Image (cartoon, rainbow, N blue to C red):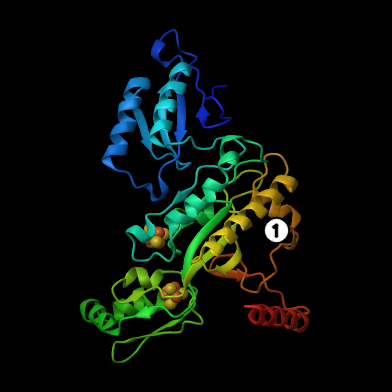
Amino acid sequence: TVSVFGYGSGIIPRFSEVAAAFPESKEFHTLRVQPPAGNYYTTGMLNQLADSWEKYGSGLVTFHGQTGNIMFIGTNTENTQHFFNDINEYGWDLGGAGPCVRTGMSCVGAARCEQSNCDEMKIHRRLLNNFTDDVHRPALPYKFKFKVSGCANDCMNAIERSDFAVIGTWRDDMKVDQEEVKKYVAKKGRQYILDNVVNRCPTNALGLNDDDTLDVNNRDCVRCMHCLNVMPKALSPGDDKGVTICMGGKRTLKIGDLMGTVVIPFMKLDSEEDYERIVELAEEVIDFWAENGLEHERCGEMIERIGLANFLEGIGVDVDPNMVSEPRQSSYVRTDDWDVEAEKWFQRKAEEQAAS
Ligand code: SF4
Ligand code: SF4
């Protein structure tokens, strides 16, 4: 294996079987390096990386690999340490590899995107920085990924590809600029708006009025982003913003692909205490999974094996009717013992309100 001092992961060792024929391929290790949150670079940063990689590596780089890392492909064992020393000096750190917390990803979000509902980069850094040890020293059942998308468009594929997906959303009414709606109708025609906006709403929450204004039933809207994407000038997220947290998404491993389950339907992320709460929640999840996950078992697979109710109990989260097995569909709510459970839920909500 190949590593740098103090680290247990981040390098993918590659030793060639055809070194006799291609001597330069004899050792061709890859370094995984964590990108900046939101993938924003300056030319200065890129120049530094390029200069060091030209000096110590093959010059081949991937921005970014499927893991979210910058992949520096092709160097020998000795130069691995030299290159790391250089870039670590500039402020870069290795990403995760193996059974550990992996490199996080966040969308361009609030810095550039009008659909953003949260501070993606701050969430990304808070979560990843808290687990730096778990990134560099693989000691978990398997990989654990954080990804942050500022809205349900989920440009980071967080729901499908991460164990802990943070998705920006809002809970008040979406903003509607009726004059802009009328302009869309005038430009595209009523039939187009009916076919491509109103009839494609997954919950039938939209209606087009005779005067070409739009009706939105915000109670039925599940914040899927479809209508906002088609008419971005007319429709935008509300003001009461926050995040939904889905857990257990993953590609095929012990069992087939899983989408993240909505475990926290809505969480405000405004104050420092809010950020501490999300980090504490992530700690609870990783601790519980580290204790209860089988070897090579992703968090979502553990949830499937032990049951969602046991998982929620393990991480100290109360069952909530807003939890759904996949965003935008399939509520977990069962109707047996409905009255008893509803009474408990209302009681809990009343207590929470009284305490706040
Ligand atoms: S996930 Fe949403 S907020 Fe983030 S870049 Fe995509 S559209 Fe914008
Ligand atoms: S965001 Fe989605 S669910 Fe909400 S009104 Fe628009 S299309 Fe319907």
Q: Is mark 1 within 8 Å of ligand 1?
A: no
| Camera-nearest residue between 322 and 127 | 127
The answer to whether 313 is drawn above or below residue 250 in the figure is: below
- Secondary structure, mark 1, is helix
For the view shown, which residue lies furthest in the bottom direction?
210
Residue nearest the observer in this picture, 340 or 91: 91
In what quadrant does ligand 2 lie?
bottom left
The residue nearer to you, when weighing 258 against 84, is 84
Q: Which residue: 58% across, 55% down?
A: 279
**Residue 254, position as x, y percentages in the image:** 66, 44
Instruction: Sort mark 1 into few (<14), some (14-19) or many (20+) by Cα contacts within 10 Å.
Output: some
- Residue drawn at x 37%, y 55% as measured from the top left: 108
**Left or right side of 350 for 182:** left
Q: How many marks?
A: 1
Residue under the point 36% across and 22% down? 58
Q: Tell me where residue 309 appears, x and y as whole percent.
A: 74, 63
Quarter where residue 99 is shown = top right
Which amino acid type is shown beneath numbered disc 1?
Ile
Residue drawn 52% across the image and 46% down it: 129
Q: Which residue is mark 1?
A: 315
* Quarter of the figure that contains the C terminus: bottom right
The residue sitting at the top extreme is 20
In-image side of 153 versus 332 (left or right): left
